[in-house]
Image (cartoon, rainbow, N blue to C red):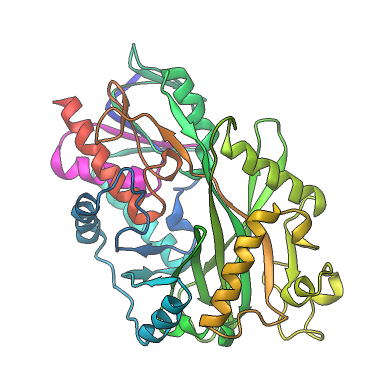
Amino acid sequence: MDKYDVVIVGTGPAGMGATFSLLENRPGTSILMIDKAPVSTGGMRNDCKMNFTYPIGFPFEYWPEDVANHYLEKVKEFLKPDILPKSNIEVYQTRAEKLGCSLLEIQQTHLGTDGGLRLIQQLMKRLTDSGVDISLKEEMLSINNEQKFITTDLREIGYKTILIAPGRHGFHFLQSVMHQLGVKYMDNILDVGIRVETRIERYPIVKDYYDPKFYFPEKVRTFCTNSGNAHVVKEKYITERGDVWYSVNGHAYAPDAAKNNGLVNFAILKTVRFTEPLASGQEFAEHLGVMAALMGGGRPLMQRVGDFRMGKRSKAASFNGDLYDFEPSLRDCCPSDISLAMPSKILRYIWSGMKKLDTIIPGILHPSTIMYYPEIKLYANKPEYKDEHFQVAADVFFAGDGAGTSRGITGAWASGIRASEGMMESLN
């Protein structure tokens, strides 16, 4: 059996944050990182947009402002981000406040998908040069914490302390680990919404503020704005029953005027918090995703705002350059009627938010604007943590979006650092 002081499951920002913290503060520690994917995973692979202002990315229940800012400074010190400039946002803030909405002023950096991949390559090289063992395409299957080893699809690995940080896609895996460890958890919060795509001149705020964070009543917000060389993409999910469904998402490449497609996309999401007797908010989300896939013939749905306002479904003829002035960046979607697939109460709140946004920034509800559905965020595991370092059992720690400790790259990195401090206490 291979044995290490520390095993870290997941090579995303939470895993990296913990590993670099261990290297800095406890030299000589033997560390293994494993990931079932063939490449380093996590949010840095997709658009690599980072926010450095509380509360973005930091769930309130785990992160008081002073604690979050303490760790944010550590993240900044390590990543050394080039913060994007902002201008003219006071106009939009004033308009938003008149409608009972808010526009948060956030420090941001954006590397783009291509820039994010370069950053990952640099970080992975630093890890291997520092003596960290990295094993990709190796999947953790089970844990025996009494005897301090995990079983993967390749071998058994001993540890003194372990961090499990699989990200949002590892939602079901993390639940399996919690069942094995006897860890209690809640699974009752999720985000459901759409991704909006339109021409950049109809959302000109992005020229002044790359990823504007609007908050509307009824727990609706904008999220993950991409512009310039921006594209809507789909992400594949498989339920425990084997059903396949897709959530849409968005990304953009690094700024390059020669390659810009002139489009902007962003999510508008409604946070839903369920109470008893619902067993699983995530299963509810999966049912929504499977229903959309059923309506779309295995694909996400898309609808033009003009069709939606007239109460009719969109058809393939609506998605060409003749009738409207841009084609969808994600062609592999089914023209449809999203009101048949989205719960009416959620859709009502989403549409209310969009109308307010169109008042703040006139033009977003142009008839050609496309609404893609579903965009669902699966990061609502809420384990019962034993301490402030996200320890769930003796010498076992969780971190990252899949464990509910963060919502984004910087929050995940910060939660990895915070978990590493508890791991060092365990090693000592």
Comparing 9 with 418, the one in front is 418
Can residue 179 be seen here? The reply is yes
Q: Residue furthest top?
A: 147
On the rendered structure, is 369 left or right of 202? Answer: right
Comparing 352 with 194, the one in front is 352
Queried whether the magenta region covers residue 372, the answer comes back as no
Queried whether the magenta region covers residue 20, the answer comes back as yes
Q: Position of residue 103 (x, y in %)?
A: 40, 73
Above/below status of 57 relative to 143: below
Seen at 41% across and 51% down, the residue is: 407
Can residue 131 be seen here? The reply is no
Seen at 68% across and 68% down, the residue is: 371
Q: Quadrant of residue 353?
A: bottom right
On the rendered structure, is 386 left or right of 171? Answer: left
Above/below status of 90 relative to 7: below
- Number of labelled discs? 0
User: Which image quarter is the N terminus in?
Assistant: top left
Above/below status of 138 relative to 324: above
Comparing 60 with 19, the one in front is 60
User: Which image quarter is the C terminus in?
Assistant: top left
Q: Position of residue 50 (x, y in %)?
A: 37, 63
Seen at 58% across and 79% down, the residue is: 358
Q: Position of residue 404 (x, y in %)?
A: 41, 41
Comparing 388 with 79, the one in front is 388
Q: Position of residue 142 (x, y in %)?
A: 47, 21
Q: Quadrant of residue 304?
A: bottom right
On the rendered structure, is 32 left or right of 261? Answer: left
> Which stretch appears magenta?
11-37
Q: Quadrant of residue 264?
A: bottom right
On the rendered structure, is 266 left or right of 389? Answer: right
